[in-house]
Image (spheres, helix red, strand yellow):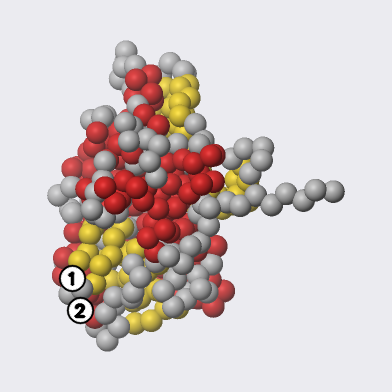
Amino acid sequence: MSESMNIAAKKIADKMVQDAEKLKVIPSTLSNGTSIIDCGVNAKGSIKGGELFTKVCLGGICDVGISIPGDLSDIMAMPAVKVKTDFPALTTLGSQKAGWKIDVNGYYAIGSGPAQTHKFKDNNIYKITNYIEDSDIAVITLEADKLPDEDIANYIADECGVKPENLTILVAPTSSLVGSIQISGRALETGIYKMYEIMNFDVTKITYAAGITPITPVDPDSLKAMGKTNDAIMFGGRAYYYIEPDEGEDLEELAANLPSSASDNYGQSFIELFKEANQDFYKMPKDIFAPAQVIVNDMITGQMFHTGFIDLKRLKKSFEVKEIIYEK
């Protein structure tokens, strides 16, 4: 791939600054030159803003859209995030993965985006995908309730080895519209992460991937919002993987173990599991983070494996859906 993910993401971020009023985001510049784009802390944010934020998370080189409605069943339909990528392993594990836990001077955030190519440049995912980041800029997205100050920006820039004025930070709380959208846009990532980290599958064999997940209803309570957004993937996310396996390699077992329902912990909500892990996101059982429903296409044999299911009952419970029925 010829273009740097940070450069691709920066182009999107710059466009967001230009269209700030229309996107309902608030851009600003810190005294050290770092660009901040508030997408939900003090800003209202927008559906389009959430779409672009998600695209930045994915390194700027994926297609992201909003489907209205995103059908889940005959009795319930919701807007949904659609993600399509021709670089599945790189864009999800090399950029979108929430791999940077920032906990500095009382400021806490979960970092995603292509800035990780600088911070974690020795990550094996860049080696196996033959990706080299040669830019001197960094773009990071933060899932956080507060905007970072100059000290936090300096820390991030230093960890990335770039000048503070070459750093762009996009921020959206979990309890915002943009936060709901970008987390729902992670169904593909969770499945690929599970293949890579738990199943030891060569994820470079995934040639194309597409996913769709309902956008979580916005909840002002950050903890409840975290639960709902992750439940959206576990109980309502759908992922499609096009894989070119080695000759004779059977993908049936891979597919069977991919969906969230294959986990021994399936049935518990994210919040329940989060509390059991002493509210440490990174200590939760890894295998539960997966799409609800998976389709794997073996591009060598032409076979298709369909596994998992949309768990509408648990999804509606998590989303606190109240049915209103009028009798005539």
* Residue drawn at the location 32% of the way across and 36% of the way down: 265
Frontmost of labels 2 and 1 is: 1
User: Any mark on residue 104, and which?
Assistant: 1
User: Any mark on residue 83, and which?
Assistant: none
Q: Amino acid at mark 1?
A: Val
Residue 76 x/y as whole percent: 63, 44
Q: Amino acid at mark 2?
A: Asp
Q: How many labels sit on residues?
A: 2
The quadrant in which residue 156 appears is bottom left
* Residue drawn at the location 57% of the way across and 51% of the way down: 321
Tell which circle, 2 or 1, labels the residue nearer the N-terminal end.
1
Residue 217 x/y as whole percent: 53, 57
User: Any mark on residue 151, and which?
Assistant: 2
| Mark 2 and mark 1: Cα distance apart in space | 9 Å
Q: Residues within 10 Å of mark 2 (few under 14, many from 20)?
A: few
Q: Could you tell me if the residues under marks 2 and 1 are in contact, i.e. CB atoms within 8 Å?
A: yes
Residue 259 x/y as whole percent: 40, 32
Residue 27 x/y as whole percent: 42, 78
Left or right, 322 with reference to 283 = right
User: Circle 2 sits in a helix, a strand or a loop, which is it?
Assistant: helix
Residue 83: tell me if it is visible: no
The quadrant in which residue 139 appears is bottom left
* Residue drawn at the location 30% of the way across and 83% of the way down: 30
